[in-house]
Image (cartoon, rainbow, N blue to C red):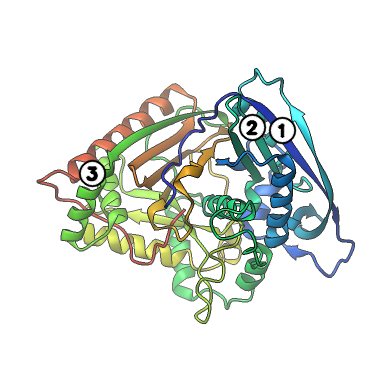
């Protein structure tokens, strides 16, 4: 079965145990790899709470010894889990490490909310320069059931990778995939080296980036309505809207098919119309796209790897016509096919623009990673401070969900909330019998 839930963690009370793996950094200077553009940008901000991602899932009550053994096998399978980031003075680099041991420790008193306990653990342990920057935890519930939780600093993972870890952990425990079916897979460091070996981006790509940055006065796209005072990061406010159930999503897909586009361009059409209705101008947003496409002779090379296989593009659209929106999506995906470091060098890298607006699209139904339904994988959210707006469109077997995050200011809460409600209403209307909108691109497999 595909992943059916990516939502706020629902975790019953229980005893929390964390497995602390010990590692030793390789002293060989020939092995470090320059960090990817996103890794370096992420780590350069330093150690701070909430830099991690995590996933919780049900595991058999096999005992902590078996869980530690399975985790060791995953670390041996994924070279990314045997790397750490270091600031070597002349840049942030990825160093290989060797696993030297590990032990379980009990955290919390059993009465605390395990979500709060785990957030405290991950805030400390899953930091950019931690060694290692990942942790395995288990929550043992009073009814005898167990929930495993894997947390990693974002520099080592993305949403797709979390599902890979769930799948492989269950396989290592003897579930789907077989206990012995865990051969090594390519690491994210190898992917970074492969990107660096690509030829320079063509002139028309550089020209497009120059136009994007000029339209933003040298900054990244910002949310088009007032956010109030975001001169410094504020506590986050997060709202989740259940936009469509499975039947409604199916109707929306049928409308899209009749118009000759997929769901993402349909959504872009709705977003553009909402901007018009709110007198907010054309749609402009940072648009993360995945970078897992392998070479022509091995297109799935990175499909089973763990790492931050995401690059940022920019989506721009000023038309509500579904075909024009599909073109805008294709252009954004194509723009994200080239390494960002040389492209954004004239602006000192990707500017940290206050009010930055980003749109993320994740269709879990299309991910080539299968997880048993009974594992009930759930995303575990960190709590952060922010000065920008992020909107995630998440599609599961149970429908479409919109999650928005904004700074906790009166203007941001009001304007982002109104924007999100109008988007949800527009998508519901688009899936009605007299719908006129549509969207998505054939090469978006998937956007995360």
CB under 8 Å between callouts 3 and 2? no
Check disc 3 and report the residue beneath it.
Answer: 247
**Most extreme residue toward the top, as rendered?**
111
CB under 8 Å between callouts 2 and 1? yes
In front: 401, or 140? 140
In front: 446, or 376? 376
Which mark is first along the chain, 2 or 3? 2
Q: Residue at x 45, y 65 (%)?
A: 335
Image-quadrant location for residue 29: bottom right
Image-quadrant location for residue 39: bottom right
Q: Nearer the viewer, mark 3 or mark 2?
A: 2
Q: Residue at x 63, y 76 (%)?
A: 197
> Which label is found at residue 17?
1
- Left or right of 57 in this view: 78: right
**Percent x, y for residue 270?**
25, 46
**Percent x, y for residue 13?**
59, 23
- Left or right of 18 in this view: 88: right
Residue 109 higher or lower than 165, as above or below: above
**Percent x, y for residue 325?**
27, 58
Q: How much space separates mark 1 and mark 3, taking CA atoms?
A: 40 Å
């Amino acid at each position: 079965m595909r992943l059916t839930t990516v939502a706020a963690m629902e975790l019953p009370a229980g005893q929390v145990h964390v497995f602390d793996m010990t590692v030793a950094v390789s002293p060989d200077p020939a092995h470090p790899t320059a960090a990817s553009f996103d890794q370096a940008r992420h780590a350069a901000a330093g150690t701070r709470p909430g830099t991690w991602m995590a996933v919780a899932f049900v595991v058999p009550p096999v005992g902590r010894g078996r869980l530690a053994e399975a985790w060791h096998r995953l670390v041996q399978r994924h070279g990314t889990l045997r790397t750490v980031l270091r600031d070597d003075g002349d840049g942030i680099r990825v160093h290989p490490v060797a696993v030297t041991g590990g032990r379980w420790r009990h955290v919390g008193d059993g009465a605390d909310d395990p979500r709060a306990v785990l957030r405290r653990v991950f805030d400390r342990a899953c930091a950019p320069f931690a060694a290692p920057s990942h942790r395995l935890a288990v929550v043992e519930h009073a009814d005898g059931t167990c929930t495993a939780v894997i947390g990693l600093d974002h520099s080592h993972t993305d949403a797709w990778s979390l599902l890979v870890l769930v799948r492989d952990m269950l396989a290592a425990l003897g579930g789907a995939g077989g206990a012995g079916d865990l051969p090594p897979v390519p690491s994210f460091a190898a992917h970074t080296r492969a990107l660096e070996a690509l030829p320079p981006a063509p002139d028309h790509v550089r020209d497009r980036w120059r136009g994007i940055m000029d339209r933003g006065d040298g900054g990244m796209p910002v949310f088009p309505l007032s956010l109030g005072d975001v001169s410094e990061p504020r506590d986050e406010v997060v709202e989740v809207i259940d936009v469509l159930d499975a039947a409604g999503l199916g109707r929306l897909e049928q409308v899209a098919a009749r118009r000759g586009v997929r769901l993402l361009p349909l959504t872009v059409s709705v977003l553009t119309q909402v901007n018009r209705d709110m007198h907010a101008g054309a749609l402009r947003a940072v648009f993360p796209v995945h970078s897992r496409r392998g070479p022509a002779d091995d297109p799935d090379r990175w499909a089973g790897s763990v790492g931050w296989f995401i690059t940022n593009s920019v989506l721009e659209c000023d038309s509500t016509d579904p075909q024009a929106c599909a073109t805008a999506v294709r252009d954004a995906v194509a723009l994200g096919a080239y390494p960002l470091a040389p492209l954004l060098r004239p602006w000192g890298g990707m500017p940290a623009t206050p009010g930055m607006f980003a749109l993320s699209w994740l269709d879990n139904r299309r991910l080539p990673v299968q997880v048993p339904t009974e594992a009930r994988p759930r995303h575990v959210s960190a709590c952060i401070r922010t000065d920008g707006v992020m909107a995630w469109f998440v599609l599961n077997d149970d429908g479409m969900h919109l999650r928005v995050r904004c700074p906790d200011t009166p203007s941001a809460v009001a304007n982002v909330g109104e924007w999100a409600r109008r988007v949800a209403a527009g998508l519901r209307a688009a899936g009605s019998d007299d719908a006129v909108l549509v969207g998505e691109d054939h090469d978006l497999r998937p956007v995360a």
